[in-house]
Image (tube, grey):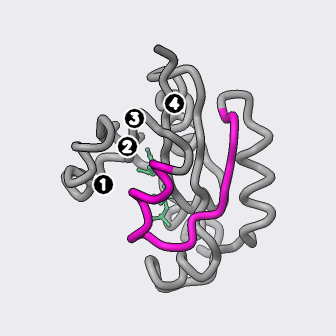
Amino acid sequence: MKKTVITFGTFDVFHVGHLNLLERAAKLGESLIVGVSTDALNISKKGRHPIYPEGERVRLIQALRCVDEVFLEHSLEQKLEYIREYRADILVMGDDWGGRFDWLMPWCEVIYLPRTPSISTTEVIERIRT
Ligand code: CTP
């Protein structure tokens, strides 16, 4: 059976840690769906406006060869609805979320992938600032 993988994130100031995560997620199945956090969700989640607005972040992720479909994620609480809507077999998250989505295991496989060390959007913004 062909497997659909779903993952979520803000993917602001796109960097190689994001690419590594998406490429590894794609290899776990036949198609990769990505939920990109809205600007409003990012503000509530991380307490700051993203540098790139949601429409631009969606376009950047959609342009990647390893990504099949992109949608805007409006709420962290709707993971199950999104998993059902896109008929996802596997939820992939970075291990900074380790354990947080285990409650979805009755509906799909949940896999936490190790983060790429030493890079993050926050760190890139800080590096440019200083
Ligand atoms: N990610 C990763 N390795 C990194 C940075 C991010 O694997 N070095 C993964 C996250 O675990 C998540 C996805 O990429 O699954 C999107 O992460 P996001 O929160 O958008 O990026 P960060 O760089 O972690 O952003 P911030 O610094 O704003 O928290």
Between discs 4 and 2, the one toward the N terminus:
4
- Please, what is the three-letter code of the amino acid marked with disc 2? Arg
- Residue occupied by mark 2: 115
- The residue at which mark 1 appears reads as 96
Sequence-first tag of 4 and 3: 4
Among numbered discs 2 and 3, the one appearing first in the sequence: 3
Residue at the image point whose x is 33% and y is 39% from the top: 108
Q: Mark 4 points at which residue?
A: 4
What amino acid type should be assigned to the residue bearing mark 1?
Asp
**Ligand 1 under 8 Å from disc 2 Cβ:** yes
- Checking the image for residue 90, the label placed there is 3
Q: Callout 3: 10 Å neighbours few (<14), some, many (20+)?
A: many
Measure how far apart labels 4 and 2 are at the Cα level. 21 Å
Residue extent of the magenta highlight = 67-84
Q: Crowding near pointer 4: few (<14 within 10 Å), some, many (20+)?
A: many
Which quarter of the image is occupied by the C terminus?
A: bottom right
| Disc 4 to disc 3, C-alpha distance | 6 Å
